[in-house]
Image: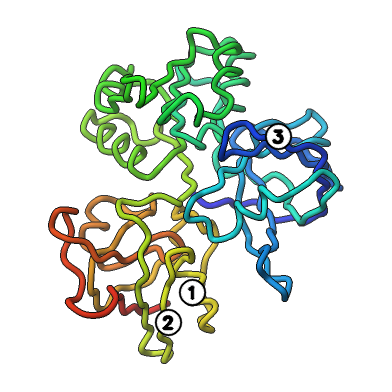
Amino acid sequence: MAATNIEVWQQATVIETTAVTEHIKRIVLRPDLPRRADPGSHIDVKVNLPSSTQGEALKRSYSVVESANDGARLTVSVFRAPSSRGGSVAMHALQVGDTLEVTQPLQNFPLRIGAPRYLLLAGGIGITAIAAMARVLRELHADYTLVYAGRSRAAMAYLDDLQQLHGRQLVAHINDEGTNLDVASLVAALAPDTELYMCGPIRLMDSVRRSWLEKQLDPANLRFETFGNSGWYAPQEFTVRIPRLGISTTVSPDRSMLEALEDAGADMMFDCRKGECGLCEVRVLRLEGAIDHRDVFYSDRQQKAGEKICCCVSRVASVGAVGGAVQGPEQGLPGIVIEVP
């Protein structure tokens, strides 16, 4: 779901930076207009591109990992993605004393207090949205389990701290140690009244949703947030056209379709930019290649139909039969022709 909060922009000063893994940086901010962040909150940040000479800024969202009671300190952790469009690179370049524009904490992933039992599931950097929830449930002596999945211990932010804090309530699944997460078994073992909160890559969340439906669990008890930057295929260059507006442009691997269309002069609708709200959906008129749906807005049936696409995160790919999708065009780039509202 998309944030419904009214954005209040303010200045924030960087007061601390720490590398918590090779690719994840912890950044502590002191906002000018302090407000405490409840578990599940995030802040939007205007990030200036290092290569820009015209003050171009990107808007990015980061979960609040920790918040002082008075909101005077807000902590985010940023993963420097290999295919970053510039946001995470700029955030990693921040130094103590730097200032940037941020919103007050926004809430679109609230933790409901009072459930009989909880399962908190984090995949990779998704722990940033889950850690504060686990801390609150521990303080409330709630019945909870924190499941944290990652490729290696070295890549899992805050793992040691979480193990010390939560003890047996934490279950770690680490790929290179042979303890990979079995989603089907995890969901099958849940009591029907369990509330599951999850954040992580699209593939993990898609697997959980499928298992949840197969067990016929209450849909209202499955709550999630995604960072919308992972898909089934590596990002590729593709073309997009809007015939009615006379717009044709190329989407590079490090840009989203939404950003490319905005640069080309299209007046686009959007909100979350994470594939959650569906406001940026456009109608597919023609396709050369395969849609790499990276949203969590559409159902499986809607994604398979291929009639619409969330252009803020989803892409077009040209992959062979081995990849399980249709071939792209014999010559040129894969492409898509769309109609906007």
SS for callout 2: strand
Quarter containing the C terminus: bottom left
Mark carried by residue 18: 3
Task: Measure the C-alpha gap from mark 2 to mark 3.
Answer: 39 Å
Residue at which label 2 appears: 249
Which residue is situated farthest in the top direction here?
Answer: 168
Dot in front, 2 or 3: 3
Residue closest to the eye, 60 or 279: 60
SS for callout 1: helix
SS for callout 3: strand
Task: Measure the C-alpha gap from mark 1 to mark 3.
Answer: 33 Å
| Dots 2, 1 in contact, CB < 8 A | yes
Residue closest to the eye, 282 or 63: 63
Residue 289 percent location from the top left of the image: 23, 69
| Dots 1, 3 in contact, CB < 8 A | no
- Disc 2 marks which amino acid? Thr
Task: Measure the C-alpha gap from mark 2 to mark 1.
Answer: 7 Å
